[in-house]
Image: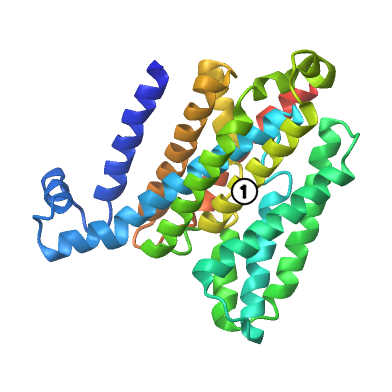
Amino acid sequence: MLWVVALCLLTVTIAVINISLGEMHLSPQQLLKALLGQANRQDELVLWQFRAPGVAMSVIVGAALALSGAIFQRLTGNDLADSSILGINAGASFGAVLFLAASQIGLQLSETVGLPIFALIGAGITALLVFNISQGQSPLGLLLGGVAVGTLLNGLILLIQLQVSQEDFEKVIVWISGSFWNLDWSYIGLLAGAFVVVFAGGLLSLHNSDLLTLGHRGAASLGLEYDKKRRQLMIFGILLAAIGVAGGGAIGFVGLMAPHIAQRLVGSKGRYYLPLTMFIGVDLLMIADVVAANLFAPSQLPVGLVVAMITVPYFIVLMLHQKK
């Protein structure tokens, strides 16, 4: 419980730093006045149009990807499982890019609605494909299946990318680099609503999910419907991954790193482990957003690049550890 409180405070602190820093600095006094609606028009514009949307998107995407990673690790029994490694992020990205291409040939659907729908469809189909072709394989075989499918989809994304208009080409570049590509409040509200609905609906699937670690026989002996629970968790994880990718593009490895840090702090019991995982995912993305926006200001790095710089070395260490 202490770790959860500490991370709550850390999250608030990072959010304040994120909002305050930038080309137009906001002091604590200016920030407080802007929050209360007593600041000048410029400060309120900086807060609500430029800084707060990034923080809000970090919360949604970070929580969704981190919880999705924790679910897939529990589902597969593999510490290296993550929606990006399993190819699910690539599937969601392929769906989104396909939507951008389809919009050129007369598909009458706004990006705010159409893109998340296509990302969800792409993530779902990819997950079913990866889990089916890897059925009966070892945990390493599942990862290799995910990497293979993800590589294929990334190749298809490149082919589509070469066929779209210049405007959509730039959108695809932003997407695959891992950025908060749409910070409009209406889109943020849509993703937030989707996350709340999916999270509320998926809470039931998390109940007794710890028993999956006992295997089919062990879990069944304690009264758990093993196959049904796995299906529920798979759907929950896919939906969360799709929401995360719809908001942050091809940001990877958040779902790998956050659960591991949480497990080292409080163990793997769901009561504290899962909330802590979400907080760590949010903090990781907010820190990456701060670095991306300020390291080479006024130029801005893709958030996904900063996340990769932090997490890929950690992933390599985990792989080396598993080989021993």
Where is residue 313 shown, x and y percent of the image?
A: 61, 36
In the image, what residue occupies the spot 53% across and 41% down?
199
Q: Quadrant of residue 222?
A: top right
Where is residue 26 shown, x and y percent of the image?
A: 18, 51
152 and 111: which is toward the camera: 111
324 and 142: which is toward the camera: 142
Where is residue 143 shown, x and y percent of the image?
A: 79, 39
In the image, what residue occupies the spot 49% across and 37% down?
281
In the image, what residue occupies the spot 75% across and 27% down?
77
Where is residue 153 shown, x and y percent of the image?
A: 76, 60
Tag count in the figure?
1
Identify residue for label 1.
239
Residue 283 position (above or below residue 243): above
Q: Secondary structure at mark 1?
A: helix
Q: Quadrant of residue 151?
A: bottom right
Q: Quadrant of residue 229?
A: top right
Residue farthest to the bottom?
106
Quadrant that contains the N terminus: top left
96 and 297: which is toward the camera: 96
Q: Amino acid at mark 1?
A: Leu
